[in-house]
Amino acid sequence: EDKVVQSPLSLVVHEGDTVTLNCSYEVTNFRSLLWYKQEKKAPTFLFMLTSSGIEKKSGRLSSILDKKELFSILNITATQTGDSAIYLCAVVRPGSNYKLTFGKGTLLTVNP
Amino acid sequence: SQTIHQWPATLVQPVGSPLSLECTVEGTSNPNLYWYRQAAGRGLQLLFYSVGIGQISSEVPQNLSASRPQDRQFILSSKKLLLSDSGFYLCAWNDGNQPQHFGDGTRLSIL
């Protein structure tokens, strides 16, 4: 059975700090790993990672995948209060119509 | 551009009552559609998915059912709600191998 484990489950930081969120996975025939940000309602898509070692970047957020060690990290630099959210990691199930298996998420709180 | 709509945003229902949550997608045709539930543990659990009209696959045995009467409409239903059906229900869509995009969700409370 596919497994996605995120750590930490929750994290409290101050504005300006840099944070690293972790996602490890066990899945046969890996295809892709996705990161989402969820504030109050809809999770919004951040990154999709398919290849090892290639960093994806969007502003202060970046993510990288290690297919040998089966994990991904999401970095946020110079955090702001607007970064407070649940960050969800998901892997695409093998042989599916892009169905996703999600981790439990990391609740990030950024205090002013 | 594509948009996804879910309603209602919040719903309070008594135990044993029926349920109907609706999701529609605009700006695309023949999308894959998904229903998820997000409980207190925060992970998203896939309940149903559909690759076309009338084609529904269930992921977990439960008190809920889904239907897709039109190409861009996905409905989540129950004949008799249980307390354990409380949660945050999210609809999502995608095309092929693209990332899934989510609606704003329905927060369902069962009393």
Image: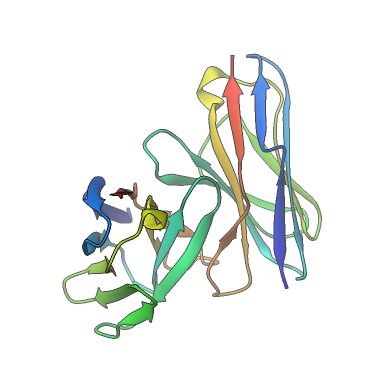
**What's the coloring here?**
rainbow
Q: Quadrant of the C terminus of chain B?
A: top right
Tag count: 0
Q: Position of residue A14 (x, y in %)?
A: 24, 52
On the rendered structure, is B35 left or right of A25?
A: right
Q: Residue furthest right?
A: B70
Give the side of residue B110 with respect to residue A34, left or right.
right
The one nearer the camera, A110 or B20, is A110
**Along the line of sight, which residue is nearer the eye, A9 or B62?**
A9
- Rendered position, B6 above or below A71: above
Residue A50 visible in the snapshot = no
Horizontally, residue B78 falls left or right of residue A80, namely right
Residue drawn at point x = 30 percent, y = 82 percent: A55
- In this view, the residue in front, B18 or A39, is A39
Looking at the image, which residue is at 34% across and 46% down? A104
The N terminus of chain B, quarter of image: bottom right
Q: Position of residue B79 (x, y in %)?
A: 71, 24
Question: Farthest front residue?
Answer: A112
Q: Residue A17 occupies which quadrant of the picture?
A: bottom left
Q: Quadrant of residue B31?
A: bottom right
Q: Is residue B14 above or below residue B102?
A: above
Give how far across and how far down residue A37 sits, in percent.
43, 58
Residue B85 in which image quadrant: top right
**In this view of the protein, can residue B91 be seen by the observer?**
yes
Quick check: B11 above or below B93?
A: above
Residue in the picture at 26% in, 53% down: A6
Q: Residue at x 50, y 23 (%)?
A: B84
Q: Is residue A86 left or right of residue A6?
A: right
Task: Tell me residue B98's x, y (percent).
Answer: 55, 74
